[in-house]
Amino acid sequence: MSKTIRKAVLPVAGLGTRFLPATKAVPKEMLTVVDRPIVQYVVDEALAAGIEHIVFVTGRNKHVIEDHFDIAYELEETLSSRGKKAALGLLEDMRPAAGSTSFTRQQEPLGLGHAVWCAREIIGNEPFAVLLPDMVMKSEKGCLAQMVEAYEKNGGNVISVEEVPWDQTQNYGIIERSEPMADGTFKVTGMVEKPAPGTAPSNLYINGRYILQPEIFGLLENQATGAGGEIQLTDAMLTLMGKQDFFGVEYTGETYDCGSKAGFLAANIAYAMDNEELAAEVRPLLEKLLKN
Ligand code: UTP
């Protein structure tokens, strides 16, 4: 079993219905948190964890994501001729190396499991990461980097989780787990999507980062549709759990669900307050708003 994770899948083919009308012509992943599109934060997290190749599973209307990670020739020429070195440097720094991205289309939004399955030929027979691009993770050491560290010790499949208040477990995918091991990781022994109130096996929710073994593709291929009439990644993971180890890592850091309006707004405020200059302008505005 390979002990390195070289490739990551970013499923970006969803419809973003919770953000309509903003997402009618602009993909949800391209909405900006301060001055960068959401998807950029997630790509940066993947690269910081040592990922060498990112597979974007896109759909129609999503071509601007591909453009965002390409050279903007006219713009960059103009910036260069005008001596705008700082702006040019920004664009160069955020660009993944040539040949380190692939784009494939899901064609129809048949569910997250189906989106991941669409990457099977590009991933091949090796373990890989999945990062849900609407979950923006803010931490000193990235969430995927924390998981890769656990993977290098224990192998298997790895799921990142974090605590939610017990009275909110019905809104999340919740795991069942064994007692934590010495390094804080634990085995995941079950998973349940949106458990009825009072029935959750823990208050640890799956926050959108996975390391999976390639055997998941064969299971996804034959996976019947589940909740919402979609092919669910969770269903295939549950089957794989009968054959392979799944480890949980309790992520340390902040998570912003940018697929929801509240999470998106919170991410904007959090990242704005991180920037000294911007924070100086934003703080009095926020204080004024909160007073009213
Ligand atoms: P979500 O359900 O949060 O995304 O899926 P969505 O469908 O875009 O959003 P709403 O609920 O309609 O507002 C989680 C992730 O899985 C991707 C989405 O792009 C998102 O990043 N996804 C989901 C796909 O790529 N394909 C699908 O068929 C479904």
Image: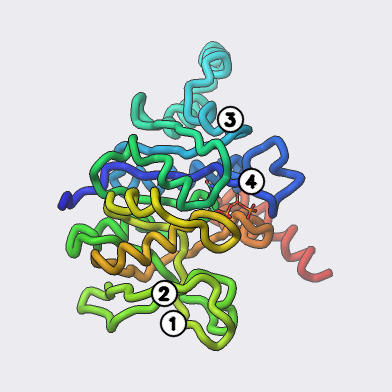
Colour scheme of this structure image? Answer: rainbow
Asked if disc 4 is less than 8 Å from ligand 1, the answer is yes
State the residue in front, 33 or 170.
Answer: 170
Residue for point 57% across, 14% down: 74
State the residue in front, 291 or 178.
Answer: 178
* CA neighbours of label 4 inside 10 A, class few (<14), some (14 to 19), many (20+): some
Identified by mark 3, the residue type is: Val
For the C terminus, which image quadrant?
Answer: bottom right
Earlier sequence position, callout 4 versus callout 1: 4
Q: CA distance from mark 4 to mark 2?
A: 26 Å
* CA neighbours of label 3 inside 10 A, class few (<14), some (14 to 19), many (20+): few
Identified by mark 2, the residue type is: Ile
Residue for point 33% across, 68% down: 249
Q: Is residue 223 above or below residue 88?
A: below
State the residue in front, 230 or 71.
Answer: 230
* CA neighbours of label 2 inside 10 A, class few (<14), some (14 to 19), many (20+): many
**Quick check: marks 4 and 3 in contact, CB under 8 Å?**
no
Pointer 3 residue? 64
Pointer 1 residue? 202
Pointer 2 residue? 175
User: x, y (%) of residue 214?
Assistant: 28, 49
Could you say whether the residue bearing mark 3 is in a helix, strand or loop?
A: helix
Residue depth check, mark 2 versus mark 3: number of the one nearer the observer: 2
Image quadrant assignment for residue 210: bottom left
Identified by mark 4, the residue type is: Leu
Earlier sequence position, callout 2 versus callout 3: 3
**Quick check: marks 1 and 2 in contact, CB under 8 Å?**
yes
Q: CA distance from mark 2 to mark 3?
A: 35 Å
Q: CA distance from mark 3 to mark 1?
A: 40 Å
